[in-house]
Amino acid sequence: MSKQQKKQRSFLPWVSLGIGTICLFAALFLSLTAKALPKPEKNIEEEDIHPQFQSEKVAAMTNLGVLDDQVKPLQQTTRAIISGTHEAEFRGTKFIQRNPYGFTLELLTVGKEEVIRDFLKQREDRDKFIYFRLSNENQPDRYILAYGLYPNEPQANRALQNLNLNLPHSLHPAVQPLSTYAKQVNDMGTDELSSDAKLYEVNLTNAPVPRATSLPNPIQTATDVLERSSSTASEPQALNVH
């Protein structure tokens, strides 16, 4: 082996060490440069965010509406009739309950109470007339004018044959049991009102209205009090002569 080749072999380790050192410094430089660079921010608007919903099972209610038969819905068409605004012949629930097996002669059915009132005002024998108000959920109110109260149907039929009230020919009286009206009568009759109730008559008269007067200001300052006290002290006092 020549001297030249020996020199070349002796330089190879140093060349390899230099190249390795250069590569190491290059790697360290690149890593430091990469850390120093700012990271790009994520664009939140461009991200596709899909919310996740968890499905929940709803239990079925099998007993919905079971109280419809016990608790009836409120009917906006029904109206409350105040007792005491009817004629003396008006009868209600207690009259039907006191005579569950009684019979009467039904004379006419009308939709307005004023018709029955006008009819009764023209009669002098109105003591045996009675009338009811029938109320139904699916029908308008009706008023039944009847005559008499009988304990059984045969007596009611005999009264119908001997009936002589000079009624118009358009009216056709018929025997009816009071029980047919029981479910439709829910009023307080005039006969249920207390007979001991006293009636008072109020007479109204014209009275003059008093004029409005200006009241003193209740808020007084310390200056007002001092001025009033000084003016009182400056006034001459009267002498009492005995």
Image (cartoon, grey):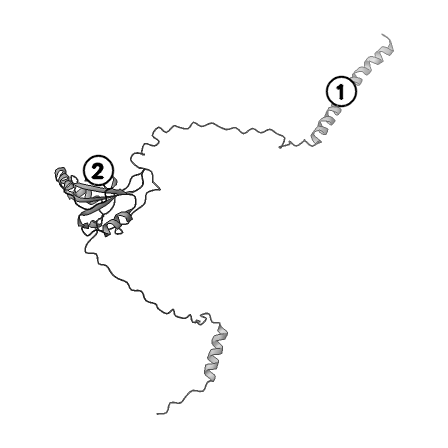
Coordinates of residue 193 in the picture (x, y in percent): 21, 51
- Left or right of 23? Residue 239 is left
Q: Which mark is residue 204?
A: none
| Quarter of the view holding residue 238 | bottom left
The amino acid sitting under disc 2 is Thr
The amino acid sitting under disc 1 is Gly
Q: Neighbour class for label 1 at 10 Å: few (<14), some, many (≥20)?
A: few
Q: Neighbour class for label 2 at 10 Å: few (<14), some, many (≥20)?
A: few
Front-lying residue, 159 or 188: 159
Q: Which mark is residue 20?
A: 1
Q: Residue furthest front?
A: 169
Residue at 48% across, 81% down: 231
Coordinates of residue 218 in the picture (x, y in percent): 44, 70
Q: Secondary structure at mark 2?
A: helix
- Left or right of 77? Residue 94 is left
Front-lying residue, 1 or 128: 128
Coordinates of residue 118 in the picture (x, y in percent): 26, 50
- Camera-near label (2 vs 1) is 2
Front-lying residue, 29 or 239: 239
Assess whether mark 1 and mark 2 are in contact (beta carbons under 8 angstroms): no
Q: Which mark is residue 180?
A: 2
